[in-house]
Amino acid sequence: MLRNSVNYIYQVYKEKSFSKAAQKLFVSQPALSAAIQKEEAVWGCAFFDRSTNPIELTPEGREFITAIERMREIQQELEDSFARCIQARQHTVNIGAPTFFCAYILPPILQDFQRGHPHCQINVIEASDNDLIECLQKDTIDACLTVQTWSGHMFQTTAIGEEDIILAVPAAAPMNKRLSEYQLGPDDLKSASRLRDDCPRLSIGEFKELPFLLLKQGNDMYSRGMKICKQGGFAPNTFVTLDQLLTSYHMAAAGTGAAFIRAGLMRYASGEVCFYGLDSKDTVRSIHLVCKKNRALPDTVQNFLSYLSHACNK
């Protein structure tokens, strides 16, 4: 933003009159003259030949006006550029989520939303929960999906749905034949992530002899898995710990061990595993939508988050 005195000089140049410039600027002529004289003193030269009528620029004044016009052009370019950036952000949604949500939950939701909002651009950032916290703090994303519970005054957390945790057991495990009537299939899902209420459920103790594939400590699935096993009266024989739930599922399918997974994965099973519902209240957990508190979100982002909340509640 140019200083007032610089704008005053430019207006006198345009009007070729101190009095007309003062009227246009809604200032008194003495105040206008004083401001220009002060600016001229800074540069050590006069910008106007006050002996002419109408007023003319001095050679230094012409150079000064040329510089002012360049600065005004640059300022306009910046304003236009920032306006375009702001407009783009108004139609851009940045959503973060762990791998499972990015691979299985978000794609159909994004596709349906964009049918009604063809000019909206949605950027999906796939990251771990720890990375998602950092992205929210830095405003890299507008919101994220997580099953973790984050404390602190910085985030606003809204439960937008629930999911069931089930056990994936390698198909070659000997107990599968004995427990075949308890095995689950896609028809046992009542929604994308919840089991029907009448599904069979077993004690985790039925599987205590198996090696277990657990996610690393600090992950909600790890703490729930340990708690569920404790309820069954044993500590799991942990064969390996992993970062990603999908990796644990694929390792279970390869016969490595049993894994706690999301019920929704049954829709995409390839037959190498058997699925079981577990008799524990800790198998149900909330899906959270997390935003940064006190951050104003554009209408397009708010519309998408409302749509996402509704879709996850179906």
Image (cartoon, grey):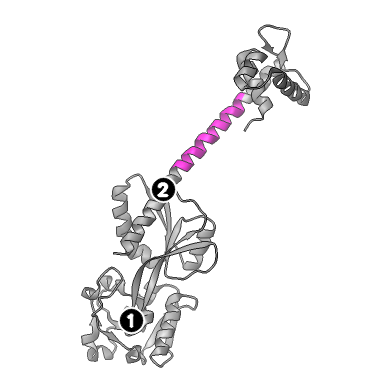
Whether residue 102 can be seen here: yes
Mark 2 closeness class: few <14, some 14–19, many ≥20 residues within 10 Å: few
State which quarter of the image contains the N terminus: top right
**Direction from residue 219 to residue 249 in the image, left or right:** left
**Which residues lie in the magenta part?**
69-87
User: Quarter of the image holding residue 105?
Assistant: bottom left
Was residue 71 drawn as part of the magenta stretch in this picture?
Answer: yes
Q: Alpha-carbon distance for marks 1 and 2?
A: 41 Å
Q: Residue at x 36, y 89 (%)?
A: 210
Q: Secondary structure at mark 2?
A: helix
Question: Does 96 appear above or below 215?
Answer: above
Q: Residue 132 at x, y = what percent?
A: 48, 63
* N-terminal-most mark, 1 or 2: 1
Q: Is residue 241 visible?
A: no
Say what amino acid the circle numbered 2 marks.
Asp
Mark 1 or 2: in front is 2
Locate residue 75, reporting x and y percent: 57, 32
Q: Is residue 163 above or below residue 300?
A: below
Q: Out of 31 and 111, give the one closest to the viewer.
A: 31
Around disc 1, counting alpha carbons within 10 Å, would you say few (fewer than 14), some (14 to 19), or many (20 or more)? many
**Res. 219 mark:** none
The prevailing secondary structure element of the residues shown in magenta is helix
Rendered position, 165 above or below 31: below
* Label at residue 299: 2
Residue 205's x, y, as percent? Answer: 35, 91
Q: Is residue 177 left or right of residue 134?
A: left
Of 303 and 49, nearer the camera is 303
Say if 53 sits above or below 199 in the image.
Answer: above
Q: Residue at x 51, y 62 (%)?
A: 155
Which structural element holds mark 1?
strand
Residue hosting label 1:
167
Identify which amino acid the numbered label 1 is placed on: Leu
